[in-house]
Image (cartoon, helix red, strand yellow):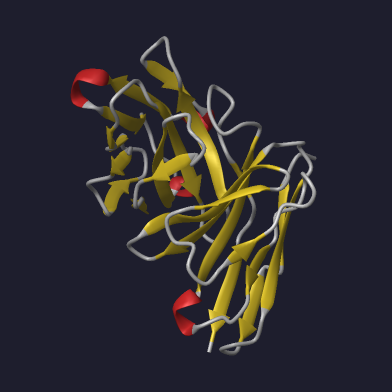
Amino acid sequence: EAQVTQNPRYLITVTGKKLTVTCSQNMNHEYMSWYRQDPGLGLRQIYYSMNVEVTDKGDVPEGYKVSRKEKRNFPLILESPSPNQTSLYFCASSLVSGGPQMEQYFGPGTRLTVT
Amino acid sequence: AQSVTQPDIHITVSEGASLELRCNYSYGATPYLFWYVQSPGQGLQLLLKYFSGDTLVQGIKGFEAEFKRSQSSFNLRKPSVHWSDAAEYFCAVGAGGADGLTFGKGTHLIIQP
């Protein structure tokens, strides 16, 4: 089944404790992206990747890191989480970044709470 | 840069009634337009998309949307809603560049029995 998976689905952590949220897609998509969803703000892009070893900042990159060493994986790293990073996080992928096949497929989300 | 406005934060509709969710976009050329639905506790699912051609596009779950260039709008419609349609709906625009999609802030749909 074609899908985007994220782990963990739920995470409660403390300020400053490094964490990684994994994202994997099995559709051979070139483009991958991370979003955070907050009430009243919709989805905001954190980082995106056009292909392996190519990543760039989205609208709200502060406090986050990403890597794209393999085409299928795009982990999100919080080196020193803070309470303002408490949010619902989505990973998404698409075949390409633009054109008629640019629709993105979303993972199920990761609910992160930082205390 | 492109932008999307969904004017209605919440909409309440009676079951069986028709539905229209509004979406206005800002972009200089013909955009790529999408509607997604997010059911409670779920990820986003693509309902439909517009790239070119016919301005009325059909999607899944009985939804359709009409692209109106003169009004910069891409409104989502359904003739008769079901209780299972209660969800958050997001309109998105893509310019075809590296930064992918820009999403509106969403419309929360409530279905009254």
| Left or right: A47 as drawn, with respect to A73 | left
Decide if residue A95 is in sight here.
Answer: yes
Total numbered labels: 0
Residue B68 % position (x, y): 26, 20
Q: Residue at x 51, y 83 (%)?
A: A82
Does the image show residue B113?
A: no
Q: Is residue A90 above or below residue B24?
A: below
For the residue pair B8 and A66, the one nearer the viewer reads as A66
Q: Eyeballing the image, is A27 above or below B85?
A: above
Q: Which residue lies most toward the top here?
A: B53
Q: Quadrant of residue B57?
A: top left
Residue at 44%, 61% (x, y): give it: A60
Horizontal side, residue A10 vs residue A102: left or right: right
* Image coordinates for residue B109, horizontal then vertical, percent: 36, 51
* Outermost left residue: B71
Question: Residue A103: image x %, image y %?
Answer: 55, 33
Q: Is residue B52 left or right of B69 when viewed as pictured? A: right
Q: Is residue B32 left or right of residue A108?
A: left
Q: Is B93 situated above or below A40?
A: above
Quadrant position of residue A84: bottom left
Of residues A65 and A83, the one nearer the viewer is A65
Q: Residue furthest front?
A: A53
Question: Percent from the top left, x then y, of residue B12?
Answer: 28, 51
Q: Residue at x 41, y 43 (%)?
A: B102
Q: Quadrant of residue A114?
A: bottom right
- Quarter of the image for the N terminus of chain A: give it: top right
